[in-house]
Image: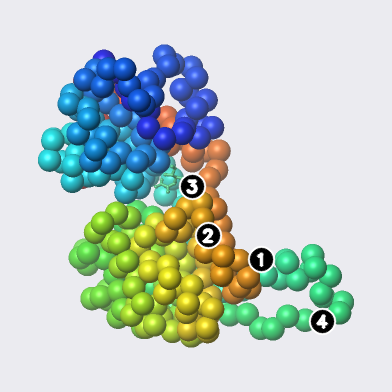
Amino acid sequence: MTVLLVGSPEPSLAAELSRREPLSSYPLPDSPAVTVILSCGGPVDADLIAGLPNLEAIVNFGAGVDAIDLAAARARGIAVSNTPDVLTDTVADTAVGLLIDTMRGLSAADRYVRAGHWPVRGPLRYARDVSGSRVGILGLGRIGSAIATRLAAFDCTIAYHNRRPVPGSPYRYAAAPADLAGSVDVLVVATAGGPETARLVDRAVLEALGPQGFLVNIARGGVVDEDALVELLTNGGLAGAGLDVFAHEPQVPAALLALDNVVLLPHVGSNTARARTAMARLALRNLDEWLAHRRLLTPVA
Ligand code: 8YV
């Protein structure tokens, strides 16, 4: 049985893998031997899946499985696992940090001090309060809920949009993304990526958020119409944005680099030693469970 490694394992996973038998990498001398893929950022597309006639399972390092063609896997009855839960708190912390940085202009203020502007230009213009603000969460899953819990402690008024209302949720449900965007100060994107949510935050949603509104995205760049986002940020159609994810990573639209109302992070949502080690171990536990018992511990629904 051959396990195919797709993508490049980051240090936490590489460290765990170095203690094990080496895995195969593509192109394979013998693709019919492959029964399991270990995916680190993919891509696991329909062509790759079609070229592996005995593929049984795809084990993903990461919660997001948007780099895997789930429809192609499903059509062949191939099982897929991810690494949920172990990164929830870490990603939620990133989201709140990014939101505060964006609304209060902390990174811009840091640049101001470093550039020596303070003694020359004096105090900065006023920023916006996070405490007491109205926050819209797009996607009230595990991570969205953890973000909401944190922001509730800042006395924020929380509303959300989700595929369907979450039973028992204390937060106001908005029937559509544009309704949510139109009723909040900051919209936090926490949905899954992939075809179902592609450009869910389109120009109309961003325009509903409006010149006083902020966008925070810790989900996937493809969930947002990036061209419309850049245009609105550039011409004052949005107050600001905090972005951990982009449509074509690691490329960041050049126009954003010049804007002081934008905070840009290189996809570091889960980037702590604890979270990444836990993700690596959970991915490998899924792999071992499949190899030993044809079962996954954390299958993707
Ligand atoms: C990881 C993530 O950096 O888990 C996810 O879906 O976006 C991040 O936590 C990424 O998946 C690693 O490839």
Disc 2 versus disc 3: nearer the observer: 2
User: Which structural element holds mark 1?
Assistant: helix
Mark closer to the chain start, 2 or 3: 2
Q: Residue at x 35, y 30 (%)?
A: 38
User: Which structural element holds mark 3?
Assistant: loop
Q: Residues within 10 Å of mark 4 (few under 14, many from 20)?
A: few
Mark closer to the chain start, 4 or 3: 4
Give the image location of residue 273, x and y in percent. 55, 38
Residue at image mark 2:
252
Image quarter in which the C terminus is found:
top left
Which disc is residue 121 wearing? Answer: 4
Q: Residue at x 51, y 55 (%)?
A: 251
Mark-to-mark CA distance, 3 and 1: 20 Å
Mark-to-mark CA distance, 4 and 3: 37 Å
Ligand 1 under 8 Å from disc 3 Cβ: yes
Q: Residue at x 40, y 41 (%)?
A: 41
User: Which structural element holds mark 2?
Assistant: loop
Q: Residues within 10 Å of mark 1 (few under 14, many from 20)?
A: some
Going by the numbered disc 3, the residue's amino acid type is Ser
Going by the numbered disc 1, the residue's amino acid type is Ser
Residue at image mark 3:
270
> Quick check: 276 above or below 37?
below
Give the image location of residue 227, x and y in percent. 43, 70
The image quarter in which residue 60 lies: top left
The image quarter in which residue 117 lies: bottom right
> Quick check: 119 above or below 273?
below
Going by the numbered disc 2, the residue's amino acid type is Val
Q: Nearer the viewer, residue 102 or 44?
A: 44
